[in-house]
């Protein structure tokens, strides 16, 4: 692979050149920082011939077609009298997780071609070890020895840097961006291990695209520009990688009115934020590796808890937001709050569940035993224990009491009774209505009806009841507009309104 190498100034000198950087991890180290430039040209590979149990593997080649896949070719000649029935290319990422691609005959005699990710879905610079698996007549089966391949980007040059914590690729941003990422990951190393109880069993990789729609090319359509939604990161768990996009200097359209938007953000802000996004996404890789699930506020809040650049105080955001709301402040109980990355709240800002989760976790660590308690919660959840039970096992305090302690710390009212039992917010049902204990059959149309978690069509609906299915009325009430019913549909319990269950 054609590369050029650049040694940047020691970071202490660099900091003097670019000025004082707010909360910048790029100032923390004085060692040399090495950046390599890769990509920008085709770099096909050829591999030595192999003979395995009478099968010969010759003319083995690899070429990156990024973003349209990794093309492997081989001439596979079986022993005399043997017919090849099927050829598969098997590949393994740095995580040890494997994939496969069906091979098709090529134009040349005994030639086989396999192209993983020919429908896109993988960003560049992932590395795999790949081998051919051959199934032939007489139940013969043979595998070639693995070869190594890099999914390079021949269309543009990228920067590359690495440390013991992470491998980083980026383009369209200053060379020092990599240093921000390396230092953020180094600063977080101990916190990851204390919080999750282990290091990752592999070194993760971060692929960082510049602001704009370019990161959509690996997904399938680079013409799509979703910048206005403000998305900045995701992961590919099987590959152990984080895929990111640097934030624009101006706020995304979705959060342009956020009262916590930075004033006059600089490229240094962008790089700090990009590095922090890396630490967020790496926390998601830990979750995947350990097998931690839970409500979305916990999953995203946990990743946010491991970020290294606090754009604003999550505690202060919640304290400020609470009096802006017309109703009770959302609770963490049950399915937890709504308000994700694409929903702006009364303060104009998005990511409410991220901030609530991170605020709760930071308070929990500060008030209930530090990261040792946090790790105990993670260990309990990794064994399949529910979040509520894991919190109580680690702290000796019920989840509801913990939440109310946290709310007192924030200056927010305790969880309201109607938040725990949504039916308490309803008045008596209005005639005509179905009575508690009554059984009825849903109408023949539509095909299915949503079952809501609370008596509101804006509530989460994570279950559905099919047409012509018998339901039992468990409770009834009216929200001032319509009657709502708590129902049991084949063991699924939730809320449906009068219009859903009444026959025409």
Image (cartoon, rainbow, N blue to C red):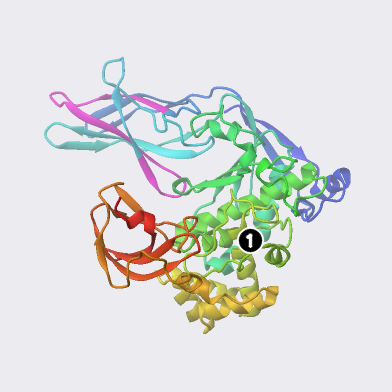
Front one among 454 and 25: 454
Instruction: Count residues near mark 1 (Cα–Cα under 10 Å), then give few for <14, some for 14-19, many for 20+.
Output: many
Give the image quarter of residue 316. bottom right
Residue 370 appears in the picture as rendered: no
Front one among 434 and 442: 434
Give the image quarter of residue 208. top right
Q: Residue lying at the far front in this picture: please name it.
A: 431
**x%, y% of residue 492?**
32, 64
Q: Is residue 92 magenta?
A: yes
**x%, y% of residue 454?**
45, 64
Q: Which residue position holds label 1?
A: 355
Give the image quarter of residue 177. top right
**x%, y% of residue 100?**
34, 38
Residue numbers of the magenta segment: 71-99
**x%, y% of residue 407?**
64, 74
Q: Is residue 2 left or right of residue 12?
A: left
Callout 1 secondary element: helix
């Amino acid at each position: 692979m054609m590369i050029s190498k650049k040694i940047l100034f020691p970071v202490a000198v660099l900091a003097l050149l670019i000025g004082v950087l707010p909360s910048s991890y790029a100032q923390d180290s004085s060692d040399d920082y090495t950046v390599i430039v890769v990509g920008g040209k085709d770099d096909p590979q050829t591999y030595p011939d192999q003979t395995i149990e009478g099968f010969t593997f010759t003319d083995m080649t690899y070429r990156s077609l990024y973003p349209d896949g990794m093309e492997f070719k081989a001439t596979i000649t079986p022993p005399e009298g043997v017919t090849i029935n099927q050829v598969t290319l098997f590949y393994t990422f740095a995580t040890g997780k494997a994939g496969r691609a069906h091979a098709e005959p090529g134009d040349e005699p005994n030639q086989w071609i396999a192209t993983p990710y020919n429908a896109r879905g993988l960003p560049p610079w992932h590395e795999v070890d790949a081998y051919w698996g051959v199934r032939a007549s007489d139940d013969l089966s043979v595998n070639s020895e693995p070869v190594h391949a890099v999914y390079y980007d021949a269309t543009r040059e990228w920067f590359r840097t690495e440390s013991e914590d992470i491998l980083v690729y980026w383009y369209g941003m200053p060379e020092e961006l990599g240093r921000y990422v390396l230092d953020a990951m180094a600063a977080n190393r101990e916190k990851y291990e204390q919080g999750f109880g282990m290091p990752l069993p592999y070194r993760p990789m971060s692929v960082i695209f510049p602001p704009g729609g370019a990161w959509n090319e690996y997904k399938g359509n680079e013409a799509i520009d979703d910048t206005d939604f403000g998305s900045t990161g995701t992961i590919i768990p099987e590959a152990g990688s984080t895929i990111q996009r640097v934030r624009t200097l101006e706020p995304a359209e979705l959060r342009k009115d956020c009262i916590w938007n930075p004033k006059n953000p600089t490229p240094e802000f962008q790089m700090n934020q990009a590095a922090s996004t890396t630490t967020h996404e790496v926390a998601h890789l830990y979750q995947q590796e350990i097998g931690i699930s839970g409500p979305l506020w916990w999953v995203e809040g946990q990743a946010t808890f491991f970020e290294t650049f606090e754009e604003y105080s999550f505690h202060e955001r919640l304290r400020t937001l609470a009096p802006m709301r017309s109703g009770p402040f959302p609770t963490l109980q049950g399915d937890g709050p709504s308000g994700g990355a694409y929903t702006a709240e009364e303060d104009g800002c998005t990511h409410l569940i991220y901030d609530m989760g991170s605020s709760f976790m930071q308070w929990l660590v500060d008030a209930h035993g530090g990261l040792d308690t946090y790790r105990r919660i993670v260990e309990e959840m990794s064994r399949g224990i529910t979040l509520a039970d894991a919190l109580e096992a680690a702290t000796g305090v019920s989840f509801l009491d913990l939440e109310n302690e946290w709310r007192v710390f924030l200056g927010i009212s305790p969880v309201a009774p109607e938040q725990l039992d949504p039916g308490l917010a309803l008045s008596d049902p209005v005639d005509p209505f179905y009575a508690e204990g009554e059984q009825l059959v849903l109408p023949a149309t539509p095909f299915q009806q949503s079952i809501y978690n609370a008596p509101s069509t804006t509530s989460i609906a994570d279950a559905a009841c099919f047409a012509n299915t018998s339901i039992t009325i468990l409770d009834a009430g009216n929200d001032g507009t319509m009657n709502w019913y708590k129902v049991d549909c084949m063991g699924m319990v939730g809320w449906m309104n009068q219009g859903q269950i009444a026959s025409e």
